[in-house]
Image (spheres, rainbow, N blue to C red):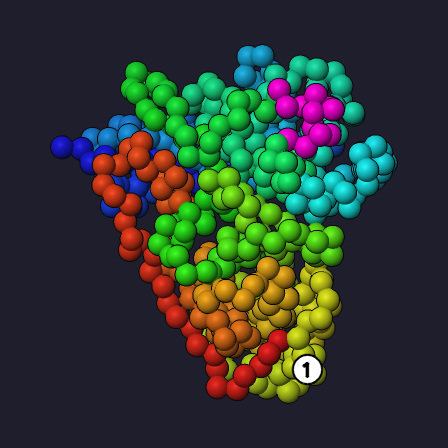
């Protein structure tokens, strides 16, 4: 008898994956794809939307041929801040613009002047001023710069909802995408912000739908339950909320390192917003206070710089062992290593460091992690409150022993764990629609944790 599974698409900026997850939340099948980026009309790199669309259908067709599995439900989690603009026939009208694309200063000035200023909009929408990363601003830009295309837009769907649309043909909006640094949602009123209404945008987002809802859909003559799709950071939080009730912070590490505190509902201040704090949305519609740094991206850039300088292969650093003696030498060698970071910085101190001052590649790499952790601690403390007892590190840095030991050393009063649920996003997405495909109760043991203790000499940085 075929094993019942949920098919979960986990779409990151770099890797696109399909997982089959059984009723015990074991990943029983995995398929990965990577696409060459294309360029938009301005020559800037962006997601290859056609390759992504084709991959969804190709992957589904492939797993439906597997006799040992029966796909009961399908859902999606993807990176945020990305709109797909569809015409009356459901076809994309534009490229999938990169959320790092520079935003025109004149249009930015016009918008905030019209709607009460940056501070007002930022506070009301719990979104830092991030240019194109505020996806609502992308739609505003399309309306102002390309009115002929905007006039053809039937639906503007965030990427998770677009992928769901490919299977269901139904245009919907979900709170985990709308509520995440988009500047579309008024957190105080719990509705679309007034500027969104004034610009006539709400009708283009599709039907507002609970994030844990499913829709009936038929694909290749088979019936499925299809989720509306989730923003990946919100999805990654779900397994932890299902397994732990003691207050914690989830430090989700990837391209962005995001500190998510679902036990902190304090209102964001203007100062916090300027330091890249924001609110995400719990899949049940509850605000989650968070802070972010672009540390995963910086790590990759600086790792390449170190590897080239010392003529080493970058992959060798993945298994580099933690050397506490080297950390203590660096702490004595570089004075600022002994002091905490006292102000917000978009980059770590390592960006400005001269690699000639390091004797070996290992020493340089330890200093890179030292600097990234200092930056992380500052960001973490922006959302830390007194009830938090544990920090769970999910993603790439959770596998980095140097990073984990330094993080634990920096906050000795809080338990620090690396999570072994490397696919928390996919598991969380499956959990969000659990009742639609799984006859078993949700498991309580899907997260394996590894505890890290501080090194002997305490360094508070």
Is residue 176 at least partly visible in the picture?
yes
Q: Is residue 331 above or below residue 248?
A: below
Q: Residue at x 47, y 19 (%)?
A: 170
Q: Secondary structure at mark 1?
A: loop
Q: Is residue 442 above or below residue 398?
A: above
Residue nearest the viewer, comparing 86 with 225? 225
Q: Residue at x 51, y 39 (%)?
A: 285
Q: Furthest-front residue in view?
A: 189
State yes or no: residue 195 in magenta.
Answer: yes
Residue nearest the viewer, comparing 261 with 266? 266
- The image quarter containing residue 13 is top right
Which quarter of the rendering shows the C terminus? bottom right
Count all numbered tags in the image, as a single digit. Answer: 1
Magenta range is 192-203
Along the horizontal axis of the image, is 6 left or right of 148? left
Residue nearest the viewer, comparing 461 with 122? 122
Q: Residue at x 60, y 65 (%)?
A: 381
Q: Is residue 239 above or below residue 436?
A: below
Give the image location of residue 282, x and y in percent. 49, 44
- The image quarter containing residue 64 is top left
Q: Furthest-left residue in view?
A: 1
Give the image location of residue 176, x and y in percent. 53, 39
State yes or no: residue 253 in magenta.
Answer: no
Q: Furthest-top residue in view?
A: 88
Which quarter of the rendering shows the N terminus? top left
Q: Residues within 10 Å of mark 1 (few under 14, many from 20)?
A: few
Q: Residue at x 45, y 74 (%)?
A: 321
> Mark 1 = which residue?
334
Is residue 360 at least partly visible in the picture?
no
Give the image location of residue 98, x and y in percent. 65, 38
- The image quarter containing residue 415 is bottom left
Give the image location of residue 107, x and y in percent. 82, 34
């Amino acid at each position: 008898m075929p094993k019942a599974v949920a098919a979960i698409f986990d779409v990151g900026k770099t890797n696109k994956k399909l997982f089959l997850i059984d009723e015990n939340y074991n990943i029983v099948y995995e398929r990965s794809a990577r696409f060459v980026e294309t360029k938009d009309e301005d020559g800037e790199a962006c997601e290859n939307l056609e390759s992504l669309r084709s991959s969804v259908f190709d992957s589904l067709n492939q797993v439906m041929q597997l006799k040992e599995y029966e796909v009961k439900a399908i859902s999606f989690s993807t990176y945020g801040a990305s709109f797909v603009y569809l015409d009356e026939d459901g076809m994309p009208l534009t490229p999938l613009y990169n959320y790092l694309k520079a935003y025109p200063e004149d249009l930015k000035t016009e918008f905030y002047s019209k709607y009460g200023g940056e501070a007002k909009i930022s506070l009301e929408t719990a979104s830092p001023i991030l240019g194109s990363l505020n996806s609502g601003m992308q739609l505003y830009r399309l309306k102002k710069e390309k009115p002929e295309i905007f006039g053809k837009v039937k639906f503007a769907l965030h990427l998770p909802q677009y992928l769901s649309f490919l299977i269901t043909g139904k245009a919907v909006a979900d709170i985990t995408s709308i509520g995440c640094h988009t500047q579309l949602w008024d957190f105080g009123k719990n509705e679309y912000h007034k500027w969104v209404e004034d610009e006539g945008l709400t009708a283009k987002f599709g039907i507002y739908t609970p994030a844990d809802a499913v829709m009936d859909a038929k694909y290749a003559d088979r019936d499925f339950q299809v989720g509306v799709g989730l923003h990946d950071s919100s999805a990654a939080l779900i397994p932890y909320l299902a397994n732990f009730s003691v207050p914690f912070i989830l430090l989700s590490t990837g391209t962005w390192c995001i500190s998510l505190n679902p036990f902190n509902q304090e209102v964001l201040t203007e100062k916090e917003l300027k330091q890249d704090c924001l609110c995400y949305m719990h899949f049940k519609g509850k605000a989650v206070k968070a802070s972010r740094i672009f540390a995963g991206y910086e790590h990759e850039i600086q790792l390449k710089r170190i590897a080239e300088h010392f003529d080493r292969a970058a992959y060798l650093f993945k298994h580099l062992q933690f050397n506490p003696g080297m950390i203590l030498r660096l702490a004595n060698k570089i004075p600022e290593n002994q002091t905490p970071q006292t102000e917000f910085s978009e980059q770590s101190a390592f960006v400005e460091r001269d690699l000639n001052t390091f004797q070996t590649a290992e020493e340089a790499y330890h200093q890179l992690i030292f600097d990234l952790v200092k930056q992380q601690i500052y960001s973490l403390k922006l959302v830390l409150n007194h009830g938090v007892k544990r920090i769970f590190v999910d993603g790439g840095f959770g596998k980095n022993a140097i990073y984990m030991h330094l993080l634990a050393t920096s906050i000795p009063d809080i338990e620090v764990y690396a999570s072994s649920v490397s696919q928390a996003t996919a598991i969380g997405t499956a959990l969000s629609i659990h009742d639609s495909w799984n006859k078993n109760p949700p498991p309580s043991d899907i997260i394996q944790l590894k505890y890290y203790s501080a090194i002997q000499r305490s360094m508070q940085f």
